[in-house]
Amino acid sequence: MERGAPIAAEEASPGALPGAEPGRQQGGRRLESGIRARTRALEQDLADRGPVLVAFSGGVDSGLVAALAHRALGDRSVAVTAAAETLAGEELDHARRLAAEIGIRHVVTVYSELDDPEFRANPRHRCYVCQGMRMDRMLELAREGGFASVCDGTNASDPGPDRPGLRAVGERGVYSPLLAHGVAKAEARCLARALGLTVWDRPANACLSSRIPHGQLVTLPKLRRVEAAEAELRNRGFRMLRVRHERSAARVEVGTAELSEAERQWNGIEARLLELGFEGAVLDPRGYRTGGADAA
């Protein structure tokens, strides 16, 4: 397979099923061959760049990169999770479990984003400030640990017209193997599933500060309130969700397929959000969407 040639996203289940039609079996074999070729190319790339430190959030993309790095380099790879105030405790726990599943050595680095007044002010380029701090910490740890490269999980679906966080990554020379090999999000899920990673179908997530509209201060009470509210919704069975902290009120977004269930449970949800300190709460009828904090 050529570098950058995509695997068909709709065929997310590698291999052929017993008793399947011959044509489907042949398609499954082609897909399996393509996955093997893509995996080998990524592993060789990482092996050539080793030893490697992986900026590891515990999501699909960074989990895939960590798994590939561990397969290619073994103990010459490490996954590092940045545990600042904008990382929910559940996300850190999940990252720890995924690292153990992969078998890669896992390091948690703790620092404060709220110590930076520019970050607290929440400008439109907040992600540039946040990713800059995060990647500076990764590069520092790489130098201290003798790692030749720092890699992250940016994939080929990520670049867009307004992605200041990716600019911070690029400016610091952090390598994005999925992006370099043209691996888009759907294919990353396919590869993660082929490698047996339980995270392969996990919904995308972002740091807690993304729930606060730009221009409104990022504070620790707001972050903890959002964290507790989203934990409540997950405990109620919702999978795709965001709780936007708009000044003193909460605006709840869930996946469109889950809206009717959210409406059914709304009285209980609203009561809990008010208990957490929100002065009001609404369910957004448009459902979850990226960039929703600023799209109200």
Image (cartoon, grey):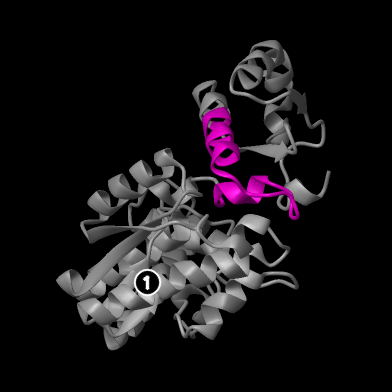
Q: Position of residue 54 (x, y in %)?
A: 35, 69
Q: Position of residue 203 (x, y in %)?
A: 54, 45
As for residue 248 lying within the magenta part, the answer is no
Q: Position of residue 162 (x, y in %)?
A: 73, 70
Tell me which residue sits at (33%, 76%) in the image.
140
Check the image and report above or below for 5 versus 95.
below
* Residue 249 visible in the picture: yes
* Residue 7 visible in the picture: no
Towards the viewer: 292 or 248: 248
Q: Which residues are magenta?
A: 204-230
Q: Position of residue 84 (x, y in %)?
A: 44, 53
Towards the viewer: 220 or 60: 220
Check the image and report above or below for 171 versus 96.
below
Tell me which residue sits at (74%, 55%) in the image.
214
As for residue 229 lying within the magenta part, the answer is yes
Residue, disc 1: 138
Q: Amino acid at mark 1?
A: Met
Quarter of the image where the C terminus is located:
top right
Check the image and report above or below for 235 versus 94.
above
Query: Does residue 166 appear left or right of residue 54 in this picture?
Result: right
Tell me which residue sits at (53%, 68%) in the image.
131
